[in-house]
Image (cartoon, grey):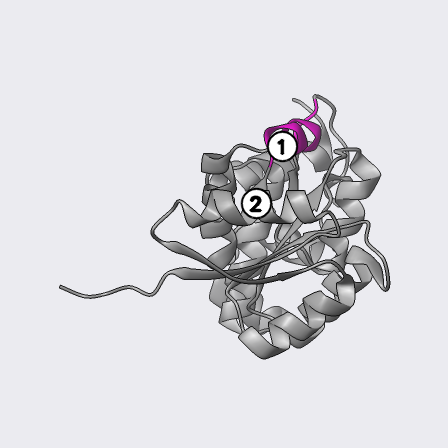
Amino acid sequence: MTDVAPISVVVVDDHDLLREGVSSALASFDDIMVVGGGPSGEDALRLVDELHPDVILIDLVMPGIGGLEAIRTLRETHAALGIIALSSYSEGHRVRAAIESGANGYLTKSVDAASLARAVRSAAVGQGAFSAEVTAALTAPRRPDPASWFLTRREVEVAELVADGRTNAEIARDLGLSLYTVKNHVSHILAKLGAQSRTEAAAALFRSRHGDA
């Protein structure tokens, strides 16, 4: 029998009760271990450097450098880190700012324990993780261009090549990226478009280019 190490998590929020509540909720799952926590963006940077967690859950509004700046810095310095933004709000501009800063996902603070754990597991393997309210906002019934589906500039480039039927290896070659990076981008694109497959994502992107037939 092979022992699998639990997913290590850091929780950063300036409200002690919220931080402790999230940590306690995650502690009830055998495959997840909270290894640290703190109340500021500076703590987020320090704890990730010291503890090397698999995932960080981070509030967006905190003293000091704040959540968005911390997310940007963490994404630049820890490319494989799973980053989930925590917020009391689900407005589009807030979600867009977090995702464009480098977060894998965005959860509202009303999330239940089971959904929180699922999000942590998804972020640990580089996949998107969004609360139901956020997913509803991402899949609202209008046909914007791909960028307004909260895709970053690089994700739009990758998405266009996915829509053209390119493989991950071909996209990596064309854009000068590693295959690992392309796989991460494709996972994020599928999550943000609410698509279950590359084919479904390509269909959504085609509709955004040409409108409904």
Q: Is residue 176 visible?
A: no
Dot 1 amino acid type: Thr
Q: What element carries label 2?
A: helix
Most common SS among magenta residues = helix
Name which residue type carries label 2. Answer: Val
Q: Give the range drawn in magenta.
A: 131-140
Tally the marks: 2
In this view, which residue lies farthest toward the left? 1
**Residue 158, how many percent across, how many down?**
63, 57
Pick the front one: 106 or 100:
106
Can residue 95 be seen by looking at this rendering? yes
- Residue 22, label in figure: 2
**Quadrant containing the N terminus in the rendered view:** bottom left
Above or below for 142 versus 67: above
**First of labels 1, 2 by sequence position:** 2
Q: Residues within 10 Å of mark 1 (few under 14, many from 20)?
A: some
Q: Residue 137, image x and y in percent?
A: 70, 29
For residue 151, side relative to residue 11 (left or right): right
> Which of the two residues, 172 or 65, is positioned nearer the viewer here?
65
- Magenta-span inclusion, residue 138: yes
Residue 180 is labelled as none
In this view, the residue in front, 76 or 188, is 76
Residue of label 1: 135
Observer-nearest of 73 and 205: 73
Compared to residue 78, the image places residue 35 above or below, namely above
**Picture coordinates of residue 213, whole percent (x, y):** 65, 22
Whether residue 208 sits left or right of residue 48 in the image: it is right
Q: Image quadrant of residue 153?
A: bottom right
- Residue at (67% x, 76% y) in the render: 77
Q: How far apart are marks 1 and 2 (CA)?
A: 21 Å
Mark 1: secondary structure: helix
- Identified at 85% across, 64% down, the residue is 65
